[in-house]
Amino acid sequence: MLRFIIIILALATPLTFAQTLPSVKGYVYQDLNGDGKRDKNEPGISGVLVSTMDRIGKTDQDGLYNLPLDPDRDMVFVIKPAGYQVPLNADNLPQFYYIHQPQGSPQGLKFPGIAPTGKLPASVDFALSPSPDPVNFRLLVSGDPQPRDSTEVGYYRDAIVTAMMGEQADAIIALGDIAYDDLSIYPQLNRAIGKLGLPAYYVYGNHDVNYRAEDNYAAGETFKSVYGPLYYAAVYGKVHIIPLSSVYYHGWNKAENKRGAYTGDFTTRQLNWLRQYLALVPADHLVVPAMHIPVFSKMIPGADVTDSSREALFEVLRGQNHILGLFGHTHLVEHVAFGEEQGWKGPGEFWGINPGAGCGSWWSGPKDENGIPTSYCLDGSPKGFFVVDFNWNRYTARFVPANLPERNQMRISFPAGVLPADSLKGRDVLANIFAAPPDAEVSWRLNDGEAMAMVRAEIKDPFIVEHLAAYRKDFPTWIERTADVVHLWRAALPENLPAGTHKITVSVRDRFGNAYQGYQLFEILP
């Protein structure tokens, strides 16, 4: 029934809204003294987009907006325009929304939801402060922090957040699974990430579900109470950051009294909102839809959204000329060039990046010298994060491995160590280049010889297969799969190498202008 109501609301005409729903109104104003309250001398700002979960409006010459509102449960929020910043709380969470839920969250949730908000205020105002956007805007991108408890929040703080401190960034986004089912850890994690001093955006993941909820809407109540709406937008220059929810929870399984199932789906209500928003985006701007469950994953088929939701999202995005998708969920580093294989038929380039998981393989594996699980992702890549640099509607991306020098961008798994001369027959040089896109140019050189091209091979990384077997006791029993890696390159190794020590150099250049090398020494026995 809820899904039916959502669809009707999303498809209603403006006249229908005006006839059946109350309205919310207020001002978007320039907060001259930064106190978050509108004073008489603080002018309204015209032309700013303000939205509910269904409709988007624009402020008039005085900064006034007026929108229809669901009387029972809705949110109204300002879409951060270029050149301005919204207020941030002590943990640097953007304060850009008002929750309207007079009765609060349903009873019986596992974790606290939204307290009753009571009567709608006469005016719901939003403060903005001038903040010129840099031409070069830097975004830190983290997949799946996913701490189970306070100890694992500490792992993320020490391994990921500390590594981020060296980046001169403008904002950070975490791509879902902010928690690992225990939603009470949000405040501790927020405090850690907040120390970056950056506006922090959070995406809703399947482990952020309040799983005792009876339906999809109520499943996000705790997340919304902390982070705000499940979908919205913020604009930096010509870049539109658009967090979305690709998680659909089917409610607590009453028949078996257990956690319900989820699928990778978008609600019709959300897609209708997105369609409205994109109609307002200039053609030369870059849109960055950011979601947890990816639109497509070649390494783990079935871990992406359903075919119907993919097609529906593509239909909404089709008119855009510049698209960069950000995805989480798979715990693998992956680039996707959307095209015919994925069903993308739009005129513009649609590129996707999955940064891997901040928690790697769910904070498992042996511990390093700092007492933090090594927790390699199951494609062999180390846990880490991406740095995305935007220049108007263009961008570059680079991977930063956690607790490793940034130059460590690959692992050459063979040849290595000391090898008998007869062990090279039919063997290949294998290099797992963690964040290399499929179209990267990769070459290798033996000793001081000529550079030779390597070819991409979609096979399992021997390192992670052997690592998982060697440290089986340090991994949960349910971690069994390793991926056919899409960022592994190979080249035939000469079989007649003389005895002695040899050097392999692997060189990489990618579409983002990144150029780096990896090295390996190995010895052939007489």
Image (cartoon, rainbow, N blue to C red):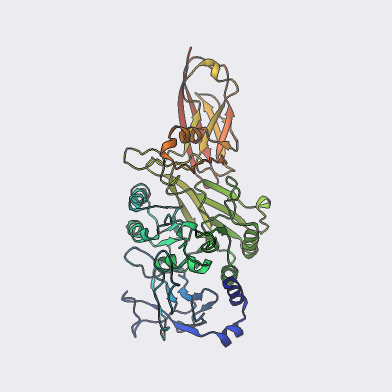
Residue under the image location 54 percent in, 47 percent down: 334
Residue under the image location 33 percent in, 50 percent down: 151
Q: Is 163 located above or below residue 255 in the figure?
A: above
> Looking at the picture, how far across and down is residue 169, in whole percent?
39, 56
> Looking at the picture, how far across and down is residue 272, in whole percent?
60, 71
The image quarter in which residue 320 lies? bottom right
Q: Residue furthest top?
A: 526
Would residue 175 be seen by someone viewing this image from the given angle? Answer: no
> Looking at the picture, how far across and down is residue 86, in whole percent?
40, 70
> Looking at the picture, how far across and down is residue 83, in whole percent?
43, 69
Q: Is residue 379 left or right of residue 131?
A: right
The image quarter in which residue 324 lies? bottom right
Give the total number of marks visible in the rendering: 0
Classify the position of the N terminus by image quarter: bottom right
Q: Is 34 located above or below residue 242 in the figure?
A: below
Q: Is 432 located above or below residue 214 in the figure?
A: above
Q: Is 163 located above or below residue 50 in the figure?
A: above
Q: Nearer the viewer, residue 139 or 269?
A: 269
Q: Nearer the viewer, residue 186 or 159?
A: 186
Would residue 151 be seen by someone viewing this image from the given angle? Answer: yes
